Image (cartoon, rainbow, N blue to C red):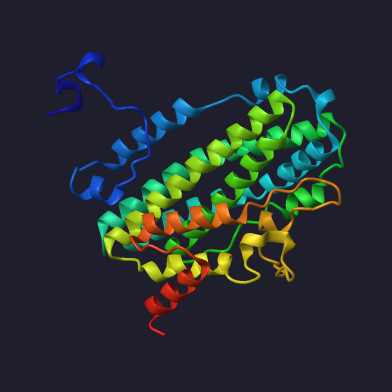
């Protein structure tokens, strides 16, 4: 039957649920029989339901009411968000390469990779909203300019890694970002600026949930082992770990890429978000969702990782 001879469906014939992330991706592909076209449609529906305007958001900010501390938060956020485009570019490249590698060996894993790469276009667009919003506010308020040299430096594309490790790192990075933005929103006085920080925090939570869904699908496939997710979590949660960002005693020197959390500036007298316990709890929850393994402390993360490695 040609495409032109297939029976048409009216809008009334197609009753779709509220747009949502396909959380059980491996099940959707193997049991429900969803195709990559089906998944792309679900991604588009969710993206459109959440789309917002940077121009409108900035129009609601009363720039005269922004305090010096809040100006510092905006400036830090703008610089940090410059590093998200190379993260999304790297994810698309890695996902497609992994898709080709798995195509003959496990078509379901290949489809998971391709669905992830397809979704990266929405992640890239939403992060572009964050970057341009905060940097535009900085420009209007005549804050310290981001030089072209810094802009280019922060655009370095991350090196490739194991895909489960990559997705777990991105999920945890979004945890840290979402908590930071939420903490900032709680203390900002201007309603327009507060709404912007809340919107960005909500975006980051949605991104985290997508990364968790893709990571879980890889573990569910049996092709990737839970130890890789725990290895990344331990990297963040260990003593002096990455969750402490630029506040940790030793920040690694990297020539290959820029991690935004390594470059946040904490100035005396200015508010800086922490909420380490909340970040830890969300990371524990993410590990549970990805691997099915429950942990409730940094020590449990390390012990589980060592057990999974076989030490």
User: Height in image: 135 above or below 149?
Assistant: above
> Relative to residue 53, is residue 234 drawn left or right?
left
Residue extending furthest bottom?
311
Q: Quadrant of the C terminus?
A: bottom left
Q: Where is residue 294 shown, x and y percent of the image?
A: 38, 62
Report the front residue among 25 and 40. 25
Residue found farthest to the left: 1
| Residue at horizontal 69 percent and vertical 48 percent from the top | 273
Q: Is residue 194 something that shows in the picture?
A: yes
Residue 228, picture quadrant = bottom left
Residue 165 percent location from the top left of the image = 47, 64
Look at 66% across and 61% down and name the residue there. 244
**Quadrant in which residue 96 is drawn:** bottom left
Side (left or right) of 299 relative to 192: left
**Residue name at image x 62 percent, y 37 percent:** 128
Quadrant into which the N terminus falls: top left
Q: Is residue 279 left or right of residue 216?
A: right
Q: Is residue 103 visible?
A: no
Residue 10: x percent and y percent?
22, 14
Please indicate whether residue 96 sits to the left or right of residue 85 in the image.
Answer: left
Q: Which residue is more in the foreground, 35 or 51?
A: 51
Quadrant for residue 308, please give it.
bottom left
Report how many numbered discs are placed on residues in the image. Answer: 0
> Residue 154's x, y, as percent?
71, 53
- In this rendering, the answer to whether 305 lies above or below 276 is below
Q: What residue is at 80 percent from the left and 35 percent from the top? A: 138
149 vs 133: above or below: below
């Amino acid at each position: 039957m040609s495409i032109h001879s297939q029976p048409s469906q009216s809008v009334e014939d197609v009753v779709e649920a509220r747009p949502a992330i396909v959380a059980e991706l491996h099940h959707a592909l193997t049991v429900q029989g969803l195709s990559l076209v089906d998944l792309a449609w679900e991604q588009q529906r969710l993206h459109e339901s959440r789309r917002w305007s940077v121009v409108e958001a900035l129009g609601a900010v009363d720039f005269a009411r922004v305090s010096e501390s809040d100006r510092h938060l905006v400036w830090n956020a703008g610089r940090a968000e410059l590093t998200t485009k190379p993260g999304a570019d790297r994810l698309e490249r890695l996902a497609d390469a992994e898709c080709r590698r798995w195509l003959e060996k496990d078509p379901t894993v290949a489809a998971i990779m391709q669905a992830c790469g397809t979704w990266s276009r929405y992640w890239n667009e939403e992060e572009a909203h964050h970057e341009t919003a905060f940097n535009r506010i900085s420009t209007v308020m005549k804050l310290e300019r981001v030089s072209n040299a810094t802009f280019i430096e922060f655009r370095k594309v991350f090196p490739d890694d194991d895909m489960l490790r990559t997705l777990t790192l991105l999920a945890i990075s979004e945890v840290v970002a979402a908590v930071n933005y939420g903490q900032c929103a709680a203390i900002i006085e201007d309603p327009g600026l507060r709404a912007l920080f809340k919107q960005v925090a909500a975006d980051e939570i949605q991104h985290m949930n997508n990364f968790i869904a893709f990571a879980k699908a890889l573990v569910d496939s049996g092709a990737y082992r839970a130890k890789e997710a725990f290895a990344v979590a331990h990297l963040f949660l260990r003593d002096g770990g990455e969750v402490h960002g630029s506040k940790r005693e030793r920040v690694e020197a990297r020539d290959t890429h820029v991690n935004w959390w390594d470059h946040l500036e904490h100035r005396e007298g200015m508010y800086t978000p922490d909420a380490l316990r909340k970040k830890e709890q969300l990371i524990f929850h993410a590990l549970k969702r990805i691997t099915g393994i429950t942990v409730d402390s940094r020590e449990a993360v390390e012990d589980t990782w060592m057990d999974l490695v076989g030490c």
